[in-house]
Image (cartoon, rainbow, N blue to C red):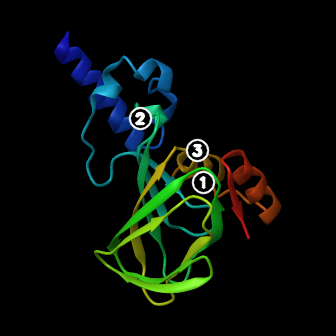
Amino acid sequence: MVELTQKRRSVLLGLAGLGVGHALLPSAAEAEGGAASQGYVLGPTEGEHLVHFRNPGNIFIKVDPLKGSKNLAIGTQQVPIGAGIPIHIHFEADEAFYILEGRGSFILNDVPLPFEKGGTIFIPKNSWHGFKNPDQELLLLWMVTPTGLDAFFRETCSPPGIAPKKLTKEQINEIAEKYATKFR
């Protein structure tokens, strides 16, 4: 029985890496007592793979309610040279970043702050923030609690091989509002 459960988990996590696992993984309610809530290990390119709607940057959702964590979402985000992350605010969530690659300028409540590889950025809820990376690609590890950023990415981004969604600024803010977020 344990072997069958491990094989099922391995298949589901592999499918998640292809961007289709989220449809097959147990819901957060089911996961609370199930195998997904017992923990797991993912490789660098495993997790739910999405491509950002504004740029060709990759996002991998690693931890979220669909995978058994009702309070925490974690993932990686690639930000191509010059793409940045627009100024926005989370009304209910604290967020943190660990800089895996690159450097640039982080804007926190209209104050630009330099950052580099190995740095950590903490953003308490109700703080306007964004990134500028004019000369280097970024690879960020993001963490947010409570969850919601993961769901925002699912609604705005696309799996690899699927055309990017053509969203207006108004549509993006409409989706963001569902997750207590607003873009300037």
Q: Give the quarter of the image for residue 69.
A: top left
Q: Which residue is mark 2?
A: 69
What residue is rendered at 54% in x and 86% in y? 112
Q: Is residue 177 above or below residue 109?
A: above
Q: Residues within 10 Å of mark 2 (few under 14, many from 20)?
A: many
Q: Nearer the viewer, mark 2 or mark 3?
A: 2
N-terminal-most mark, 2 or 3: 2
Instruction: Report the amino acid beneath label 2.
Output: Ser
Give the CA distance from mark 1 to mark 3.
10 Å
Q: Is residue 36 left or right of residue 172?
A: left
**Seen from this angle, which residue lies furthest left?**
3
Q: Position of residue 85 (x, y in %)?
A: 57, 72
Of the 4 image quadrants, the one containing the C terminus is bottom right
What residue is rendered at 36% in x and 80% in y? 102
Task: Residue 157: give its label.
Answer: 1
What residue is rendered at 35% in x and 18% in y? 34
Q: Position of residue 63 (x, y in %)?
A: 40, 43
**Seen from this angle, which residue lies furthest top?**
1
Q: Is residue 33 above or below residue 169?
A: above
Instruction: Report the amino acid beneath label 3.
Output: Ala
Task: Residue 151: give its label.
Answer: 3
What residue is rendered at 40% in x and 30% in y? 68
Please name whichever residue, 88 or 100, is drawn nearer the observer in this view of the structure.
88
Task: Residue 142: give its label.
Answer: none
Give the CA distance from mark 2 to mark 3.
13 Å
N-terminal-most mark, 1 or 2: 2
Q: Is residue 27 visible?
A: no
